Amino acid sequence: MSLLELKHVYKIYGDLHALDDVNLKVEKGEWVSIMGPSGSGKSTMMNIIGCMDKPSKGEVLLDGVDIAKESSKNLTLIRRDKIGLIFQQFHLVNYLSALENVMLAQYYHSVPDKEEAMQALERVGLADRARHLPSQLSGGEQQRVCVARALINYPEIILADEPTGNLDDKNEEIVVDLFHKLHAEGTTLIVVTHDPEVAEVAQRTVVLRHGKLEREVINENFTGTFQH
Amino acid sequence: MFLRMVRGTLFRQWKKMLMIAFTIALGASLCTAMLSVVLDVKDKVNQELKAYGANITVVPKQASILNDLYEVEGQSAGTVYLKEDELGNIKTIFWAFNIVDFAPFVNTEAILDDGSSVAVTGSWFHHHLSLPTGEELDAGMNSLRSWWDITAGEWIDEASMEETAVMIGDALAERTGLSAGDTIHLKGTEKEGNYWIAGVFNAGGDEDQQIFMQLNEAQALSGLDGCVNSIEVSALTTPDNELAVKAARDPSSLTIAQYETWYCTAYVSSICYQIQEVITDSVASAVRQVADSEGAILDKTQLLMILITILALVGSALGICNLVTASVMERSRELGLVKALGAYNRSVMSPVLTEILITAVVGGVAGFFAGIGFAQIIGHSVFNSSIAIRPMLIPIVTILVLLVTFAGCIPAFRTILKLEPTVVLHGG
Ligand SMILES: Nc1ncnc2c1ncn2[C@@H]1O[C@H](COP(=O)(O)OP(=O)(O)O)[C@@H](O)[C@H]1O
Ligand SMILES: [Mg+2]
């Protein structure tokens, strides 16, 4: 059984088909990129996979559970346990330190654990910035805090919606390296991006256009920088 | 973590929180002030009325029983009377010095020239008393009916006017076309004669149909020499307490010590009791008419103040509603993020609610003390006395402030419930 399976998924706003009969399977431990022009439905798809939105039609099976049929309370529960979210605009709470921002995710998941949060920051190379407020961090550093926050509760899937959209090349590289590391550790990654360079480091790229799945590309030369 | 979030918001949105605290303080202070005035003033005014205007009426025992049985006033007047020569005894009781004024009344009838009959009341007007104690007193209607509006002429003065001077009510004056200075012919059962109208009054009641004259003249009209239907007494009294209430029901139920205490305290009931001791076959009872009519005005004032309180609270609720909603809107991103991180609605709301509650407590406490200050200002400027603060105000104001705060938070919480992380975080 696939970790995630979308079957004939539609999302319709008025007469706009933001998603139009999308079918997709993602296996456990896979790294998938989703590409497509602006307005093609990438974020809509991420929201549905991320249990923040429901499809108008179709099935979304996560671990065999059809999340399209779940109550919003259960969706919250599933999201908190199985999904790690990374956004384009970092979305950190600006009066909490980097460490506290990571602990916030623990707080809503179970209980805050400072040690563990600190380890997560170490993994993204920000141990020395733990006490800094988001405003005292660079864009790249903020996004790394978000990565630490996304992985703190050991999610089954990390969903990243244009994680490098607001980053310069250098920081983009750091974040992509992090993804390699996470992938190597067995995390399932779904990364939405504009950027072909970011897309083609994944195992597989899915291209959306006008809400339809246009094509799928297997990256033959996928190596994984941090392969075992 | 929870506290960090609460603190973060309190600091970041301190201006808004200050506004919310101020709004709550305003509501709480008005509410405190109005309620403390409402709770205290009734007793205050009643106390004053009792202390200075307490009226006691004394009627013959049979008349009182008949009145009680048939609830017909004045019906038995023809049969039983008090004795005029015992009137002076009233100033000999234990609490004689508390009796500031009293007057006897005799009720009779006379026939006018046009054949119609008119009620005639005899009483005292500036009646000079030289008491055996050496006390000098001018007693009578002039002070017991000080609220009468004299529309023509003046009050009868026993010392300077003829005994045939009378006063007539303005309704009667209108009916007969007579006024002050005119002469009116009255025919009683035993005597008839011409009476000179010293004044016309407006009492705002049945008395406006009547003629008032000196006691002896009224007695002579109907051959009731030495007879008195009732006595009105104005006494300074101590406000009632439990003992007084118990004694008023049945003095014989008291222990000797209680009886002594009661008898030697100027309760209206003990004064009544003492009057009964010196006036043969009489029943003295406290009259609350004056206090009651003042009480009606007071009730209306209280109603007004309660309305102001309600409006103030509604106003605060609306103000809080605006501010809290704005505060939630301002951090919709943060709240949306927290939802995306897996927070249930109630976990999203609880820090917001905590902030508002902290703010409400600060505002409420400040408002409470400000309200106590307002109450004193109102007390001194309107009622000329300070307002006692009842302990029960604290729970009442607390509950009201909490209710208003929660009511004000409802729309903001609905906003939080409807908040979609997708809309907030991705902007569609
Ligand atoms: N809440 C919404 N209401 C109406 N239309 C929406 C909403 N969210 C997204 N859309 C529309 O759906 C389409 C896909 O949007 P989106 O998934 O955000 O695109 P992408 O992320 O690929 O740029 C767009 O045309 C967008 O305008
Ligand atoms: Mg998008």
Image (tube, rainbow, N blue to C red):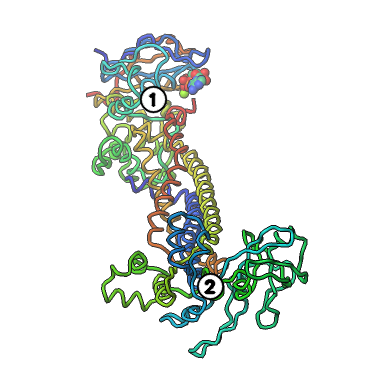
Q: Is disc 1 placed on a helix, strand or loop?
A: loop
Give the residue type that dot 2 points to. Cys
Residue pointed to by mark 2:
B227
Q: In this view, does B213 lie above or below A122?
A: below
Q: Which residue lies furthest to the left in this view?
A: A228
Residue pointed to by mark 1:
A52
**Spot occupied by residue B332 in the image (x, y as percentages of width and height):** 46, 36
B74 and A15: which one is in front?
Answer: B74
Q: Place residue B294 in its image quadrant.
A: bottom right
Give the residue type that dot 1 points to. Met
**Spot occupied by residue B417 in the image (x, y as percentages of width and height):** 42, 32
Question: Whole-Å distance between the Cαs marked 1 and 2?
Answer: 97 Å
* Residue occupying image coordinates x 69% and y 75%: B164
**Spot occupied by residue A124 in the image (x, y as percentages of width and height):** 31, 36
Decide if residue A119 is on the left or right side of residue A210: left
**Spot occupied by residue A60 in the image (x, y as percentages of width and height):** 34, 15
Q: Quadrant of the N terminus of chain B?
A: top left
* Residue occupying image coordinates x 70% and y 67%: B186
B149 and B299: which one is in front?
Answer: B149
What chain letter is assigned to the residue under label 1? A
Front tag of 1 and 2: 2
Estimate how packed mark 2 is, as few (under 14), some (14 to 19) or many (20 or more) residues with alpha carbons within 10 Å: many
Q: Does the rendering let one see residue A38?
A: no
